[in-house]
Amino acid sequence: MANEAKPCPCNLGDKFDYEGQGHEVSVEHIRAYLTKPPHHTDKAVIVIHDIFGWQLPNTRYIADMLASKGYIAIVPDFYKGQEPWKPSDDWARFDDWRKTRDSKDTNRETDVVLKYLKEQCNAKKIGVIGFCWGGAAVHHLMLRYSEFKAGVSVYGVIRFQEDNYNLRNPTFFIFGEKDEHIPLNQVAELEQNLKKQCKTDFEVKIYPGQTHGFVHRKREDINPEDRPCIEEARKDMLNWLNKYI
């Protein structure tokens, strides 16, 4: 189970023992994990990591899952070579650490990855998903980039997000009912603000009994009680991408 005793906005949960089916590439000033489906496609998804960085096997597992469903998937290093957070780090310094890795400071990396996908992978229809820190980044990017046909913010920490809700294109927000780091009153306020300001399709969905990290930090085989919600959330994420991309 996820270690909910840690004062961390993204529980480590189960670290997957997973090698990955893709490979690492250089995209101008950053590195990225790239994985492709067996057949040609012009659809791609940028996958934005959580605080544990672009090399976490869990995130690469999700990217490979997207590739198996027909998408080019890329996990860029949005920390630009800076160290990701480690479970052994001192949690007292987390806020200072995060200030040097602002989820709103992602435009330059997004620009070079979009260029790479268009020029090197022939992608024409592109979406973006992100987890925790990456979920907050999705909110930021969906405010600014019309290139993203769809976005999925998976337990994006609301206190990391900006106070603007006029999203460019359809965005799906996934939350866990028992997420101690994203209280339900914050989720309700987010939904109300979206209803007031957002002119495109959006959905906010809360999954019963789930804690932070359940979509990519818990394994179905060792967390059987969570399996229905894990599978439902992943299916919902794919259905949203399929609908709009």
Image (cartoon, rainbow, N blue to C red):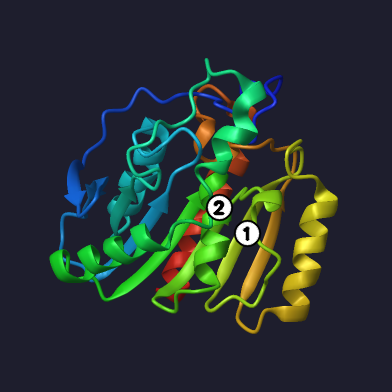
Figure quadrant of residue 140: bottom right
Q: Is residue 112 visible?
A: yes
Tell me the quarter of the image containing the C terminus.
bottom left
Question: What amino acid type should be assigned to the residue bearing mark 2?
Answer: Gly
Q: Dot 1: what SS?
A: strand
Q: Against 203, is 60 above or below?
A: above
Q: Residue at x 47, y 70 (%)?
A: 150
Q: Against 89, is 73 above or below?
A: below
Question: What amino acid type should be assigned to the residue bearing mark 1?
Answer: Phe
Left or right of 161 on screen, residue 62: left
Q: Residue at x 26, y 35 (%)?
A: 20
Q: Are marks 2 and 1 in contact (CB under 8 Å)?
A: yes
Please give the residue where the numbered disc 2 appears in the rendered image: 135
Tell me the quarter of the image containing the N terminus.
top right
Q: How many marks?
A: 2
Q: Nearer the viewer, residue 68 or 173?
A: 173
Residue 15 at x, y = what percent?
A: 45, 24
Q: Is residue 234 visible?
A: no
Q: Residue at x 41, y 36 (%)?
A: 53
Left or right of 211 on screen, residue 153: left
Q: Residues within 10 Å of mark 2 (few under 14, many from 20)?
A: many
Q: Residue at x 85, y 52 (%)?
A: 185
Residue 133 at x, y = what percent?
A: 55, 46
Residue 211 at x, y = what percent?
A: 69, 35
Q: Nearer the viewer, residue 232 or 202?
A: 202
Mark 1 or mark 2, which is nearer the start of the sequence?
A: 2
Residue 173 image label? 1
Q: Dot 2: what SS?
A: helix
Mark 2 → mark 1, Cα distance in angstroms = 8 Å
Looking at this view, name the residue that lies furthest to the right: 185
Marks 2, 1: nearer the viewer:
2
